[in-house]
Image: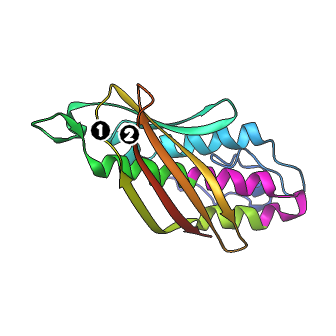
Amino acid sequence: MTIDSPKDDSNKSESPKKWTGNLHLGAKADLNVVLSQLTKAFNTSPYFSHNAMQMRVVNDEIEGYIEMQPFLIGNVAFQILHGGVAATLLDSIGGIVAMGELYKKAEPEQLADTLKKVSRLATVDMRVDYLAPGRGQYFIAKAETLRMGRKGCTMRMTMVNDEGKAIATAIASYAY
């Protein structure tokens, strides 16, 4: 039996980084690459795959997308999207857009600190308001930044159906 020897640590900086877009410390991050890599990371999540959720970049912004599926129905009598699915999509879009905002604001000399913040980002609190029954062929969630601070941020998220009708909205605080 052959055992592979440990890899030389000198090549660590050259190893591909799957979700950071191969960012190089000391260089300004290419925002399009960063947004693309963030969406790829979220889309490979087993939970997202299980629930058929997607993050995608549209017009230089990240949006969450989910098609109505029979296994996402919460109210069988009325064929309405489960509220937990809406809350998950809203929380996720808030977090990923917050990550993108951190990269947008980062100067090259702050990139190492920004990488740490992004990797630690976590939801602290979220309030969801369900505005209408979750009817539709698909749903799109978007987020906007209300406040970016040194240790956390506040985001507002909205989910609409295929007719553009607001289904749910949320405000969340994220720590990093």
| In front of the other: 128 or 101 | 128
Q: Amino acid at mark 2?
A: Ser
Is residue 99 in the magenta section?
yes
Relative depth, front residue between 19 and 74:
74
Q: Earlier in the sequence, mark 1 or mark 2?
A: 2
Q: Secondary structure at mark 1?
A: loop
Secondary structure beneath label 2: helix
Viewed as shown, does residue 150 lie left or right of 161?
right
- Residue 78, position as x, y percentages in the image: 15, 35
Residue drawn where x is 64% and y is 55% of the image: 145
* Other residues around mark 2 within 10 Å, as few (<14) / some (14–19) / many (≥20): few
- On whether residue 44 falls in the magenta region, the answer is no
Measured as percent of width and height from the top left, residue 38 is found at: 61, 45
Mark 1 → mark 2, Cα distance in angstroms: 20 Å
Q: Nearer the viewer, residue 91 or 108?
A: 91
- What span is in magenta? 96-112
Residue 102: % across, % down: 72, 58
Residue positioned 80% across, 56% down in the render: 105
**Amino acid type of the residue that numbered disc 1 sits on in the rendered structure:** Gly
- Picture residue at 59% right of the left edge, 64% below the top: 154
Q: Nearer the viewer, mark 1 or mark 2?
A: 1
> Is 118 drawn above or below residue 167 in the view shown?
below
Q: Are marks 1 and 2 in contact (CB under 8 Å)?
A: no
Q: Residues within 10 Å of mark 1 (few under 14, many from 20)?
A: many
Which residue bears the numbered disc 1? 134
On residue 69, the disc is none
Q: Is residue 24 above or below residue 31?
A: below
Magenta segment's dominant SS is helix
Q: Which residue is mark 2?
A: 49
- Quarter of the image for residue 150 reads bottom right
Say left or right for 66 vs 143: left
